[in-house]
Image (spheres, coloured by chain):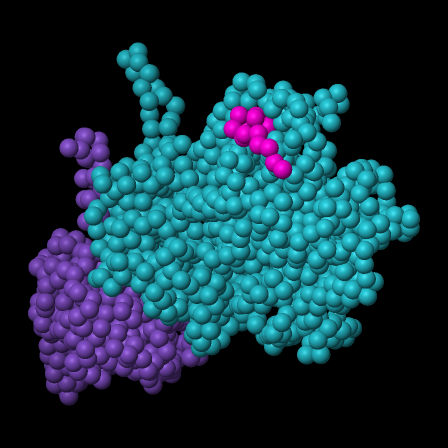
Amino acid sequence: MLNAPRGSTLLALLVLLTACSEKVADEQRAAKPVSSPVTRVELVDIPITYTVPGSVVSDGRVDVSSRVVGFIEQLDVREGNKVSRGDLLVRIDQTDIDEAIRQAQAGVRASQEDLEDAERDVEKYGKLIQTGAVATETLRKAKVRLDIAGATLDKTRSALAAAEAQKGYATITNPVDGVIVSVAKRRGEMATAGSTILTVESHEVLLFKAFVAESSLALIDPKTPVTVRIDTLKDTPFRGRIRGIVPSGDDITRRYEINVILPNDPSLVPGMFGRAQILLGMRKAPAVPRNAVVRRGGLDGVFVLDGKVARFRWLRIGRELDDSVEVLAGLSGGETILAAGNDAVRDGTGIEVVESVR
Amino acid sequence: MSERHLNITGRLAQIFITSKLTIVFIIAVALMGILAVLRTPREENPQIVVPAALITVSLPGASAAEVEDLVVMPLEGILSEIGGVDHIESTAQNSLGTVQVQFKVGQPKEESLVKLYDRVLASRSRLPTDAGTPFVRSIDADDVPILTFTLASSQYDDYALKRVAERMAERLRSTDNVSVVSIQGGRGREIAIELDPNRLQAFGVTLSQAYAAFGASNLSEPLEPTVRDGKVEAIKLSASFASVEDVLNQVVAIYNGRPVYVRDVATATDGPPSEVTTFSRFSFGPGDPRFGQPDSADLPAVTIAVAKKKGANAVVVADALIDRVERIQASLVPKDVQVIVTRNDGEKANAAVNLLLEHLLIALATVGLVLIFFLGWREATIVMVTVPLILSITLAADLLGGVTINRVTLFALILSLGLLVDAAIVVIENIHRHYGSKRSRAGKEAITVQATNEIGSATNLATVAVMLVFSALFLITDMAGQYFYPIAYNVPIAMAASLLVAYIVTPWAANRWLHRHVVQEEDAHTQEATHGEPGKLERLYLRLITPLQQRRFMRLTFGSVILVLMAASIMQGAWQFVRPAGVGGAVSALGVPLGFLPKDNKNTFNIVISMPETDPVEITDKFAREVATLLSTDKSVLNYQTWIGQAGVEDFNGLFKGTAGRTGTYVAEIRVNLIDKHHRWESSIDIARKLRPKVDAIRASYPGAKVSLVEDPPGPPLRSTVLAELYGPDSKGLRTLSGDVVKAFAATYDIVDLTNTEPFDVVEHRMVPDKEKAALSRVSTAQIAEALSLVYGGKILSRAHLPDEKDPVDVKAYVPRRFAVDPTRPDRVFVGNADGKPVPLSELVEVRPAPADRPILHRDNEKVTFVGAELSKSVPLYAVLDLQRRLDGITAPDGRLLKTSNLGFNRDAPDTIDGYRLLWGGEMRMTLDIYRDMGIALGGALMLVYLLLVAYYRSFLIPMIAMSSVPLGIIGIFPGHWLVGADFSATSMVGIIALSGVAIRNSLLIIDFIQDNLKHGMPLDVAVRQAGAVRLRPILLTTLAIVLGSAIMVSDPVFGGLAISLIFGTVVSTVLTVFVVPILYDLDAQRRAPSARRVGANVTTPGSEANHHE
């Protein structure tokens, strides 16, 4: 029987051990060889890349604002709504515009009346001049008044057209297919000319925007493709190309903006955080399959085949490549290693090679 | 011959002969002996007290050269002011200066350290103001663990094992006499914040911002209490990290009005650090029954190391600890965890001591048998009873004098065994003779006292001579002096005790148990000569000595033969130096190498690996694994523990070699434990010798790697066996010179484990901030420094406040390897400028590749570099002389000639006034020192004995005749070593000293008898040869006792030399002494009194000699 404090220490210790130690599966007789596929450690091309973080931005980003001033009468879309081209987005209160139209219409009518009166005067004086009842001078003045009346009618007509045109600006339709990303105003608010009411983002062209340090600028060849990895979309790298480097840098932080055109992919959403890997060159380094790396007693390494037995080799793992990892130290290439980790294998375990994986 | 003038001997005998005090004395002495055996601390080897301390001073940011000038040299100056300092070794490296002070051997430890502290702290003002406070740590042999337990398991990793070990260690600390309990190996718990520089950048957070945020958030502080409702209530600010979640939920910055949490920019883990830089693992070897079973090799391991307090008995402490561990194991250690005792100095000491006690008994029994044969069993029994009493007194003196029971102590006892029975033999023989004498009319008691009294002065003289000779060993200085101290202390005490016991107990016992018997022969001397076997031996002796006495030609021939033999014997040692083939190379067929102390057969050795400084820990591990694979094929290997990235548990040897406590990616050690030496045929020396070429073959594929198979030396530890200390004015020059010397070493016969202290050049990326650019970007250098320190190495932010945690748990922020930033392109590291805008580091610093600052070594105030090596089977003397021949006068880097020195009998101090110098250190120096000291000791001893004899004999010449027996022993010594196949070593020198005592003793007894005979009126020539004949038997008896008593030591690798010198020397010396001394005496007497010549010249047959006297 354990006494209470010792018992609890023991219990705590056991819990602790099971919680934080690496359990290895059931033991196997070391004498019996373990079958395992093997592979040769090859020197692979490891890209030397310049990784720069940035985010996905949309190239077609439209800030919708009103041209007319007026209270917003209708604004039904909300952030995140998908909208198509031509959809009604905003209607501004039209009362002022209607009044202006009516005013213009009245002006037109007035100037029409005036024109007709002037025509009649010219006709009347034309007849009377033959009788000599009026002076030539009078006819001339009537003609002038007719021209003026004509011009005034044109003016009032165009004023009417302008007033009617205002009516079109009071309803704002969607210019691009996309998504409402922000709505700045609410119904009933005053829309002033030029102020953004809402923003629509097009998904047609997405860019990856990043800032490159000045010293790295010279190393970048705009023609080489760029791999962009988005953190949330771990498994799919995107290939883009550099659209351009904005040729004006920030003189404080010494960074230049670069834009990478991303492929059209529905999973890409503007604002996503990612890294662009810009290829600078290649170097040779040994790499091992990710599966071959095992952990023994807290050390990461692989089993190297030494004759017929496996010998554990502790590795310094470097960069993670697609399905393999770069080895910084511990292997030099050419060694034969077990292609897949096997819990039964220990240092010195006999190995029976089943197949060679190239 | 009456009680009128009893000397001290007679008086002692008289007091004790019938007294009950004798029984009390015997019982008291026996009890003292038992107490001494039980109470005296046991050790394997005598502890050598060398006070030493390590002083560390930091000078942040200073280059090695700066540290050398500003910290190391002033410190060295300060330390040189202290008396009793032997050597100062220092290292100046970037930002750090370390100075190791070694006091002279035998200096009091506490006092020396107090002096040191005083001096260093008082001289603080001589160091730069920005230098850190000098940190003084004493290097204490008592802190070396005596017991280590290794926890190994295939089921748990080192982190889990360390947690078990921590809990075990807690339970061990309360054991009696335990000093330091430490846990070595295993990763501790840590809250690791792995920062992703890219994410930080994406959120516009700079590293320094993140760092500041962590530091400012982990706070807890008691505040001034308040009074509410008439009661004092405490207030406390509580914002400490208590879990990973707390850390993850920490706000780092505000980005676009949203808080950025740690979880957004980093991952945090609680547990062992994921990036392993040090590691230890354990494997069973073929010598263990568990070998070959699953999970018996390559197990993660953690070691608990326990040191004992000074003066405590290692055996007792170790047993108590093992008992505790067994009980802990039963209660709280999971059964998958194996607990293995990987070092047990207590058991080692106990085994060594017990083995020697056993040897002592065997020696005693052998001597007893000889005595029975020569003296008869009653007399033999009495003599044998005195031996334990004498040993008891000696051991009690050890207990009182603070001498531990160790190998050397016991060897001293075995060595003195032959000598210490002698007094008792002489007394008992004389008593026996008197009992048999018809003329004695007195009572038995009176005769006994008379008999004791009679031989008193001669025995005293001989014994005092031997004591003087052995006391001369006190003259040996330094570590060797401490090593041989038990011999110098024990033998004279044993001799004195033997006299005391012989005069107190022997007469008493003889009086009780020996019977008086009447013998036919009246003459005492003749009676003695024919006691036991009828005088066959004596007749042979007389037949041999008479022609020598009578014929000048025979004498000359005899003398020349002795001289030739002596020369031949010396030549065996000296041939190597004068032979045409040169001093290097294998020892000639008949030669005997001159060494220091041979290696011992041990149960363990250490493989010390130093890879090039440029190698990462994984490569070091690979190499260590390949070596370990070799070990797993050796049947003698019990188990081995590999340490990667750190040195293993320190031992006394490593402490002095400078290999203890090393850390770094290029460091590895494999501690190999062998099957107990009684259960294997091969000695550890042979195992290491066989292993070396195999290890060398592996090393060949790792350029720049250095491996040493370090066997614990039997004597004082040294940096290297063969050590060249190169001094010079310039570090670069020293490096070149070091290269040359290494080449010379490599070309030397039998050189292995070559090491040097010149590190490999490590490429350094020097980040030089561009001050203008930084100013324009509004970034300070301090910010750059902070960001860099986070990226490279990380920073401990604070300590987590976790409940139930035995060790502090650090919260550490760092950039993990998978996000590692290429130092040549630091464009992914950002520093926040004054406006809060991130500026990439690549725009602020220029990266210049350069070789890293090399450490600068000093020894005794001069720049130094060491080249060291071991020898697999030969002795350093020849290697050094060979190297000396090739290196002396080579051109040093400054164009002048290299001066080599320190091969004289006195140490040379380094100086570089005349350019580069090479001083030979290591075992060579030790050898020279010890041979010098032994020579002085022997010379001094002989001088003292001579003066003593002059005083006794009132003659200058007779003592010379008496001492002529000493050089005769040489004839036996070298051939003896050659026959056994042993090196002539420092212990052989001790043997010679011992031999001198024995030889002088023999001749004294002969001379005493000659004079006695002359007093009885015998003619000179008869007196001379009769004395020889009469003393022949007791002399042979003593010799036989010595030879057989010491014979058991011959097989010991270390003390074998002593036994060989003693045995062969004594035999030869004795055989020749019985002829040479009488003849020399004869010649001398004739010269002085020609009239005494040849009274019985015509009587030549030995048989008639006795008649003549009648």
Q: Quadrant of the C terminus of chain B?
A: top right
Q: Name which residue lies at 53% across and 34% down.
A: B382
> In the drawing, does residue B596 fall left or right of residue B214?
right
Q: Name which residue lies at 31% across and 45% down.
A: B165
Q: Nearer the viewer, residue B611 or B459?
A: B459
Vertical arrangement, residue A258 with respect to residue B175, above or below: below
Q: Name which residue lies at 22% across and 34% down.
A: A6
Q: Position of residue B657 (x, y in %)?
A: 55, 56
Q: How many marks?
A: 0
Q: Position of residue B211 (x, y in %)?
A: 39, 50
> In the drawing, does residue B898 fall left or right of residue B297?
right
Q: Colour of chain B?
A: cyan
Vertical arrangement, residue B1042 with respect to residue A320, above or below: above
Q: Is residue B512 magenta?
A: yes
- Residue range (magenta): B504-520
User: Residue reaching furthest bottom?
Assistant: A130
Q: Quadrant of the N terminus of chain B?
A: top right
Q: Is residue A115 magenta?
A: no
